[in-house]
Image: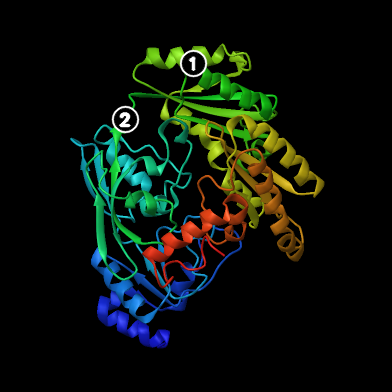
Amino acid sequence: MKSYKSLSKELTLLLGASKVVTDKEILGAYSRDETSDLSAMPDILVRAGSADDVSRTLRFCYEHSIPVLPRGAGTGVTGGAVPVAGGVVLSLEKMNRIIEIDKENMVAVVEPGAVTRHIQDAAKAEGLMYPPDPASLESCSIGGNVAENAGGPSAVKYGTTKDYVLGLEFVLPDGSIIATGGKIVKNATGYNLAGILIGSEGTLAVITKIYLRLIPAPLLTCDMLIPFPSITEAINAVYSILSHRIVPATIEFMEQGAIDLAAQFLNKEIPYPEAGAHLLVRIHGGSEGDIYADIEKIGALPDVDADKIIIAQSPVQQERLWKARRCIREAIQAVSPVFLAEDCVVPRSKIPEFLVELKKYFESKSLRSVMFGHAGDGNVHIDVLKGDMDYDLWKGGLPELKRQIYQRAIALGGTITGEHGIGFIRKEYLPMALSREEIELLKRIKKAFDPKGLLNPGKIFE
C-alpha cells in the first residue's frame, strides 16, 4: 500500500486542495466524538461538498483498500465517529443544506450535515413539525441521527428517527450512488434499503440525501413538572397517565441523584430539590380546552399530588422548567470529565426495579451514579462517575460494571442500548443481547454492502 502522504496528494488532485486535510492540529479535532475517554487519530480528512465528492472519495479508497469513517457532527457517545482504524475521515459537515420543505407533501429534503434543530425550525416556519428530538439536537446532524436511529424525549408519542425517513440517497463503498424512496408514503417495491441503513452506524454506506416525513405542528404546548417521593411512585404515575388515554409528547424522569447534581451545577434552587424523583410532562393540544382537560386528568390521578404540579405554558416558563433536565450531561462533565454513559431499555413497568437495584450495586462499589431518561418508552440513561477514583482502577473495573448493567436490563426483558448504538465501546457486549445467529446475519449484511470491510471498521462487531 502507498504511504498516506502519497495517497493524500492523489486525493487532493482528485477533489481539490480545499477538501483534503492532513494538518495534524486539524486532524486532532476529528480524533474523537463525545465519548468519554476515547480518541484515535485519522491519517487524512476529506470534507465532502457533494454526493459526487463522496462517491469519488469512496471509489478511491476502495481501489486502495483504505479504511473510511463517515462523520457528521461528532455528537455520538459510543465511539462511532472515532477513527480507531485510522485511514480517511469522510466529513459530511459541509453538506448541510435544507434543500426543500415541501409543504404540500409534508416532506423535508435535506443533506446529511443539516443540524436537526435547523430542520425543526424550517418545518415550524411552514406550520409543520419534525418530531424526533435527541438531546444534542442543537448541534447534531440529521445524517448522524439516521445512522444511529436517534430517539429523544418525544419518542413516547411520535416515535424515533426511523418513523420519519421516507427515502435516502446513499453511496456504497465502491462509489456507486443509489436512491431509494422519496416523497411517497407507501413503498412496497423490493427490500426496504432505507430501513437497513437506519441504525447501521456508518458501516454499510454513506448517506448523502434524506427525505423526512413531516406532520402538522401542534397548536399549543404545555409543560408540567410533577414531584414524587420515589422513582417507583413516579413510574406508577406514568402507567396511570397512559392508561387514562393521555399520550403526552414527552414523559421524562430524573431520580434523586440527577436532581441533586443539576441543582449543584445550576447553583440555584430548582423546584422540589428534596423529591425522590421528578416527572417532566409535555402535552400537545389543539385548543386550551384539550390542554386543560389533560391537566385535570393528570392532577386527579392517585399517585399525583395536584397541589405540587408546576405548569409552564410560555416559552420562558418552559425553558426554566426544563433547565435542570437539559443540563445533566454538562453537570456530569463538570464534576467528572471521565464517566460511563449507558442508555439501556427495559419495559416501562420495570424501570423502578432496574434503577433501585442498580443504585444499590453502585453504592456497594462506592460509585456515584446519576439516572434519568425517557419514562414513557423505558429508555434509561445511567451515568456512573469516575470522580476521584484511580484511573487504572476505574478502567479495570469498567468491563464488569457494564456487564452488571446489561445483564440486569436483559433479565428484565430489555436490551443494552435504546438510542446511542453499539459503536466501538459496546461491541464486545453485543453477544449478550443478540444470538450468534443474529450476529452472523448482521455480518452477512455488512459483507453484502461492504465486501472489503472498509467502511467504519472496528465498530459494532468484535
- Alpha carbon of mark 1 to alpha carbon of mark 2: how far? 20 Å
Give left or right: position of 85 versus 405: left
**Please, is residue 227 above or below residue 2 in the view?**
above
Q: Nearer the viewer, residue 38 or 404?
A: 404
Residue type at the position of mark 1: Ile
Image position, residue 305 (x, y; %): 62, 15
Task: Give the residue at x 57% y 23%.
Answer: 239
Image position, residue 25 (x, y; %): 47, 75
Helix or strand or loop: what does disc 2 sit on? loop
Residue 411 showing in the rendered view: yes
Residue 203 showing in the rendered view: no
Give left or right: position of 103 versus 392: left
Q: Report the residue marked by disc 1.
A: 295
**Please, is residue 29 above or below residue 268 in the view?**
below
Helix or strand or loop: what does disc 1 sit on? helix
Q: Nearer the viewer, residue 187 or 379?
A: 187
Residue type at the position of mark 2: Ala
Task: Give the residue at x 26% y 76%.
Answer: 15
- Report the disc number at residue 83: none
- Screen quadrant of the C terminus: bottom right
Q: Residues within 10 Å of mark 2 (few under 14, many from 20)?
A: some
Image position, residue 233 (x, y; %): 66, 23
Question: Residue extending furthest left?
Answer: 104
Q: Report the residue marked by disc 2.
A: 217
Image position, residue 1 (x, y; %): 42, 87
Task: Give the residue at x 68% y 47%.
Answer: 407
| Dots 1, 2 in contact, CB < 8 A | no
Q: Residues within 10 Å of mark 1 (few under 14, many from 20)?
A: some
**Please, is residue 404 above or below residue 289 in the view?**
below
